Image (tube, coloured by chain):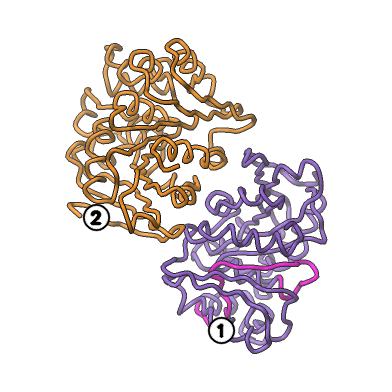
Chain colours: A purple, B orange
């Protein structure tokens, strides 16, 4: 494998889960990700599903807590979970805040100093990572889907809306759907992208869906007891945007659920099924 | 709820997962545990299944990583996961070692100073905790099962073998089955129980099964790539002991699996099904 380093490997649901690092040209340093290969991967190329995690997460949280491997093994999907940001870049203050810098790359290509020298997560997710996966794992490059949680739900929606030819299916758990209108997004975008808010629009799912639409139904699960719902996630802004352009959206408000992985695990089966159907595995 | 303090609560697979603390008379201090109540618990009393975790774990690991809630909700089982030891006891050096003291109670009643004033995990698991659960949750006290992982697999086997009237079913993932013959067990038992090795026999599953047997089949899953298999777990000692007394044992060596929660999650469905059948839910 070209420049890929296997850090650890686990047998899981008859397949194998590996944690890898590699030198990223896009992010100008070492990046990490996890790949789950179901049993079917030993025999033939399979569709691949990318999961983008939320604030503070690494490439591990999803694989350890979401319970997705069971369904990936059932449907024959390869799962890829990248880290949420570059790390150890040497940028002063990168570790100082939980919602900015390390663990909080927000899946944008930073244009502002000092972040722009490493924080190129958008290009990493839509270009470098898929190429690396295609070169090293038995995937079907024409069958790729993407989903995510919170900040990663934002990332998944943005990456899919802007690249429908790459990502043939998309879903999200409790996504930040209107970052230009919420404190997390405004903080991150002003420092990664600068104060010209015109540049922010390319990373706002609610703006993008109105401009671009998406070729198939979008699935979103959102807990009603999620403490971030009204201030940060702004789910209804995206629902209204989809409605305005007749974008098919399956938005499910799940009564009593919060923002945690216990929420994700409860509905992960439905998301893998959504992608399996879209990627023609069902 | 008498003296129970709810620390946090999460909706999960249609039921609720709560983390609790309470003043334990047995352990002479605060103890913590987690309880998952499936949706059916809102309507009627249900069987209860205790999971004992391994070295370094708390009451959280199993609930976050094993993926058991899905099957508990399917079968109608309440899950209880206690912490693995007392904490913050004030005993000098309690936090110094990962395989002794905090996080490593080994499910014994310590007889040696200074541990005996708090480390009474055996009595806590077989007496105080079940009474507390019965008083505060909608359980069927005549339908209780127990299982665990590694040190907790040892604990589950010992608790069930010595109390078959309380625990009507038992299973384990990668259990320490012959602690008197392995370094982890010898270290813990010598310091909790003293150097009279006769007192150790009451906490050795391989000895107990020969003396006491068990009223129903025991299920054990063991990964063949588990790095602790040959030095610490000694699975074959238990298999031989069961064979010697014709104890029904379903020991499954799982090729390529290690000692992690990725192993547990891969086979958790079979374990919940084993208990559901024994506890007459299937």
Kindly identify the residue that appears in the image at 68 percent across and 65 percent down: A121
Where disc 1 sits, the SS reads helix
**Mark 2 residue crowding within 10 angstroms, few (<14) / some (14–19) / many (20+):** some
Q: Nearer the viewer, residue B116 or B262?
A: B262
Q: What span is colored magenta in the figure?
A: A160-183
Q: Do dots 2 and 1 share one subunit?
A: no
How far from the left and from the top, in percent, is residue A73? 67, 47
* Secondary element type, mark 2: strand
B24 displayed left or right of A171: left
Q: Residues within 10 Å of mark 1 (few under 14, many from 20)?
A: some
Left or right of residue A180, residue B243 in this image: left
The stretch drawn in magenta includes residue A164: yes
Q: Which residue is mark 1?
A: A237
**The C terminus of chain A, quarter of image:** bottom right
Q: Which label belongs to residue A14?
A: none
Q: Is residue A193 left or right of residue B168?
A: right
Q: Is residue A181 found inside the magenta-colored segment of the image?
A: yes
Up-down relation of residue A242 to residue A221 (above or below): below
Say which residue label 2 marks: B5
Who is closer to the viewer here, B189 or B239?
B239
């Amino acid at each position: 494998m070209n420049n890929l380093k296997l850090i650890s490997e686990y047998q899981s649901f008859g397949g194998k889960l590996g944690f890898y690092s590699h030198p990223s040209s896009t992010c100008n340093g070492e990046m990490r990700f996890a790949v789950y290969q179901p049993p079917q991967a030993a025999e033939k190329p399979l569709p691949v599903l990318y999961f983008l995690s939320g604030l503070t997460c690494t490439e591990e949280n999803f694989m350890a807590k979401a319970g997705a491997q069971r369904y990936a093994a059932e449907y024959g999907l390869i799962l890829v979970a990248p880290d949420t940001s570059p790390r150890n870049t040497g940028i002063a203050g990168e570790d100082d805040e939980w919602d900015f810098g390390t663990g909080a790359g927000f899946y944008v290509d930073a244009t502002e100093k000092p972040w722009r020298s490493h924080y190129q997560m958008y290009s990493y997710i839509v270009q470098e990572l898929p190429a690396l996966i295609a070169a090293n794992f038995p995937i079907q490059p024409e069958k790729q889907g993407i989903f995510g949680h919170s900040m990663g739900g934002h990332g998944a929606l943005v990456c899919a809306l802007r690249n429908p030819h790459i990502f043939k299916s998309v879903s999200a758990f409790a996504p930040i759907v209107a970052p230009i209108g919420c404190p997390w997004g405004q903080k991150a975008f002003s420092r990664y992208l600068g104060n010209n808010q015109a540049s922010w629009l390319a990373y706002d799912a609610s703006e993008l869906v109105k401009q671009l639409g998406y070729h198939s139904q979008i699935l979103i699960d959102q807990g009603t007891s999620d403490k971030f719902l009204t201030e940060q996630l702004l789910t209804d802004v995206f629902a209204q945007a989809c409605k305005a352009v007749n974008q098919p959206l399956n938005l499910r408000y799940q009564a009593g659920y919060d923002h945690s992985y216990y929420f994700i695990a409860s509905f992960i089966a439905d998301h893998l099924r959504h992608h399996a159907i879209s990627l023609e595995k069902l």
